[in-house]
Amino acid sequence: MSEEIMRSEHFSAAIAGLIGTGLVAGGMGVLSGVPAFAAPSQRTDSAREAGRPLAHGEILSLRLASDRDFRYLAYVPNSIARGAPMLVSVHGISRNAREHLRLLAPLAERYGVVLLAPRYGRDRFPSYQRLLPDDRGVRPDALLRAAARELAARSGASDRRLYLFGYSGGAQFVHRFAMHWPEQVARYALGAAGWYTFPDSGQRYPYGLQPSRRHDLGGIDLDAFLGLPGLVLVGERDVHKDDALRASRRLERQQGSSRMERAGNWVAAVNSAASHRALPAPVRFDTLPRSPHSFARSMRRGGMGEKVFRHFFGAGPR
């Protein structure tokens, strides 16, 4: 079966009756009611495909109805309950969204969780990690929210509060999304981010919380963010500089020189900010055995997926 469930040349006429568009910078499209479950979809280019629920048990490549240039991947487990949780997994600069879902799918089956992986193209979103908009003013976080709402309507999952996981550049995106939209997040997990936004009002965003004219993304509700349970994971061998690691004197003075060091300093800063507000420490730090800076090796050697799912959902079914 083709992975392309919705084909643009035949989809637009049918979707007009299903989905109200309106995605602008900071906005979302709105879905009307769509059935939640059915038998796996068939190979077809018919416009009727637009109204069919999604196939279960395979990775699906979808176009966002309200922004046909934006694609995302989805995985609906073979057996889920209505209102099942939705886990968003955000790629790094290698744009390996399919690899994320392929390696997370067995855990999604076990826990009954719907997976969503946005795909932020290099040309359109070169700075998606900082939530910066494209040339038309459309923000990557707004597209994620729209995709989650669309996938919830078609799969029966809940998008009321998302479980957010990101690796490397995706971890940068995830913690900044959680800072800007804490009411949209249930829990978050970060895998080996290159650098972080610190809870420091003396530093301009994206280094800290002070507003920046260049990054005009609105305010950050630090108190609400500090109420979110977070998990930070770094491979025990991810202690060296490489070409993908952002480096500057300013960054190294604030955060450290390696992903391991930066993660530890950020976790300490976030937990300290919570302590000053008489809140419990919200973030936990853990390492991944035998893992360098590699998503696949962190999953296979370090047990990253299992750690993320346990943080999100507990021990799960046996």
Image (cartoon, rainbow, N blue to C red):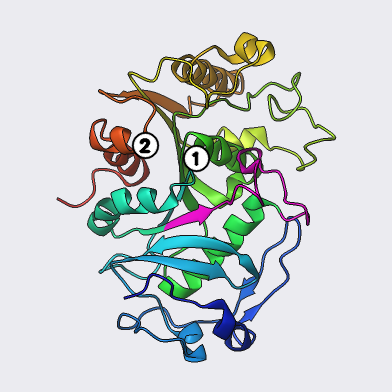
Highlighted range, magenta:
116-138
x and y, in percent, of residue 240 in the image: 43, 15
Q: Amino acid at mark 1?
A: Gly
Residue 56 painted magenta: no
Taking depth in this image into account, of 114 and 228 the one nearest to the observer is: 114
Q: Are marks 2 and 1 in contact (CB under 8 Å)?
A: yes
x and y, in percent, of residue 309 in the image: 32, 44
Q: Which of the 4 image quarters holds residue 288?
A: top left
Tag 2 secondary structure: helix
Q: Residue at x 53, y 54 (%)?
A: 119
Q: Main secondary structure of the magenta part?
A: loop
Q: Which of the 4 image quarters holds residue 127?
A: top right
Q: Residue at x 37, y 71 (%)?
A: 82
Q: Is residue 304 left or right of residue 204?
A: left
Alpha carbon of mark 2 to alpha carbon of mark 1: how far?
9 Å
Q: Residues within 10 Å of mark 2 (few under 14, many from 20)?
A: many
Residue 135 painted magenta: yes
Question: Does residue 159 appear anywhere in the picture?
Answer: no
Taking depth in this image into account, of 43 and 276 the one nearest to the observer is: 43
Q: Report which residue position mark 1 lands on.
A: 92
Q: Is residue 81 left or right of residue 144?
A: left
Q: Residues within 10 Å of mark 1 (few under 14, many from 20)?
A: many
Q: Is residue 135 left or right of residue 90?
A: right
x and y, in percent, of residue 24 in the image: 75, 62
Image quarter where the N terminus lies is: bottom left
- In the rendering, which numbered label is found on residue 302? none
Taking depth in this image into account, of 199 and 204 the one nearest to the observer is: 204
- In the rendering, which numbered label is found on residue 295? 2
